[in-house]
Amino acid sequence: MPARAAGSPGRLPEGLTGLGGLPEREVARVALSGGLASVLGRFMFPNVLFEPVQKFKAGFVADYAVGEVDERWKDKFGIWIVRTEEVVYALISVCTHLGCTPNWLPTQNKFKCPCHGSGYYKSGVNFEGPTPRPLERAKISIDIADGQIVVDKSKQFHQERGEWTDPESFIKL
Amino acid sequence: MASVRAIQENIVNSQIWKSVFRVGIPNTNRKRVLAVLGSLILHLHPVKVRRSGTRMSYTWCMGGTSFFLFLVETVTGLLLMFYYRPTIEYAFTDIMDLREQAPFGIMREMHRWGAHAMVIAVWLHMFRVFMTGSYKPPREFNWNVGVILMVLTLLLSFTGYLLPWDQLAIWAITVGSSMARATPGAGNEGPMSGLIKLGDIRLIHAGDDARFGLIGGRSIGAATLLRFYVLHCVAIPLVAGFLMAIHFWRVRKDGGISGPL
């Protein structure tokens, strides 16, 4: 079989190759399609989100009754603040099963999700229904300047990863 | 009478007529067959159909019903687009207006019931093709195209589900899109995603995973509504239309509608 002419399409002269031993045309094709795919993919991830702020001031510890689940921030920020004898923590009101918003049922002393019936104790630990893990807690701290509680939802703490012992996940009273 | 014939002949011999119909009126069987083959509209139907292909008890006519329902959805959906605005201020009230105020409020119900019927028809079509063994070579490629078309039908149904923007829509899409969190390597709760780390910072989280790319945010919101609207009205129908063309073309190339080869 006669050797192809050096200038024939898709072939380089003998001994000349592009990246990784592939013909240059092949390299260009891979680079072009990879580039197009990543532009298309990246385009679907916005830089700015128009969502409620992740960090907010939640008033003073004294505003919350001991032993209660406080629902005042649930609609606006999706947070329950729970105060016990020893600590204050912020539970994120997103069911860890498939993302619905559970209800706090004070008479039954539990969180119950209306979608598939997952149930959680006041601590956020799951005990019934299909959910595989406890509710997540948000970062909570006291602002030194004015003494108010600051909740930051952008940092979550998972009980099953042992993160609830992290001092950022609760306020010690 | 003669004058009518003269007018007819004038029309048929005019430049405009000849530019539309390239050959004259076919007056022999051979010319009629060629006219079918040579016309864009007419060639969509095969020149010959096997008798078994017209037997309802064999085909259930479910493929044709699926396509018919796709056309119904296209026409009613196009009409709904004249009244519906995919924003959180207007979406729900526009749906209410479509029912209560727009003329022929049944248009929205037809779109909705047609969608349910299409999902059922597509499944029954798949069941029939499976039971008659019509997925076997040389039709295995068309079976795969059909499976993709079935997934696209379900995705059309899923994206349309959000558009009424009521409680059912929002929570159904919250639940449905949460499955994307379990994508291996790309969803924040998926297998292997936890291994993608920089130091102890997880690179795949709720703010950049597969679900985020799908719904345009951490939770269902204005971005999701617009995304699902574009997917529902433009992106998925375009892909489905392209694949349907291949699907129907391959039915004929692979030996015609069902029946023995």
Image: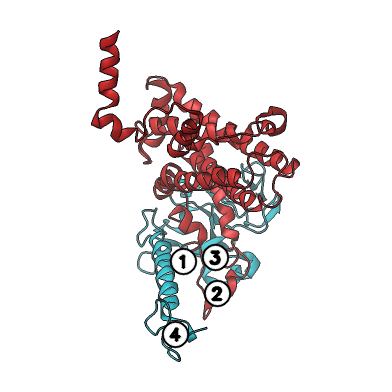
Q: Which chain is cyan?
A: A
Chain identifier, red in the render: B
Amino acid type of the residue tagged 2 in the rendering: Ile
- Name which residue type carries label 3: Ala
How many C-alpha atoms fall within 10 Å of the one at disc 2: few (<14), some, or many (≥20)? Answer: some
**Mark 3 Cα within 10 Å, few/some/many (few <14, many 20+)?**
many
Q: Secondary structure at mark 4?
A: helix
Look at mark 2 in the image and give the residue it sits on. Answer: B196
Q: Please say if the residues under marks 1 and 2 sit with CB atoms less than 8 Å apart.
A: no
Q: Which mark is residue A141?
A: 1
Q: What residue sits 72% from the left and 44% below the top?
A: B130
* Residue A98 shows in the view: yes
| Residue B131 lies in quadrant | top right
Measured as percent of width and height from the top left, residue B250 is found at: 58, 47
Which chain does the residue under circle 2 lie in? B
In which quarter of the view is residue A47 placed? bottom left
The image quarter containing residue B19 is top left
Residue ID for mark 3: B186
Q: Amino acid at mark 4?
A: Leu
Q: Which residue is mark 4?
A: A19
Say yes or no: labels 1 and 2 on the same chain.
Answer: no
Label 1: which secondary element: strand
Which of label 4 and label 3 is nearer to you?
A: 4
Mark 1 closeness class: few <14, some 14–19, many ≥20 residues within 10 Å: many
Q: Position of residue B127 (x, y in %)?
A: 70, 40
**Image height check: is B234 above or below A31?**
above
Q: CA distance from mark 4 to mark 2?
A: 28 Å
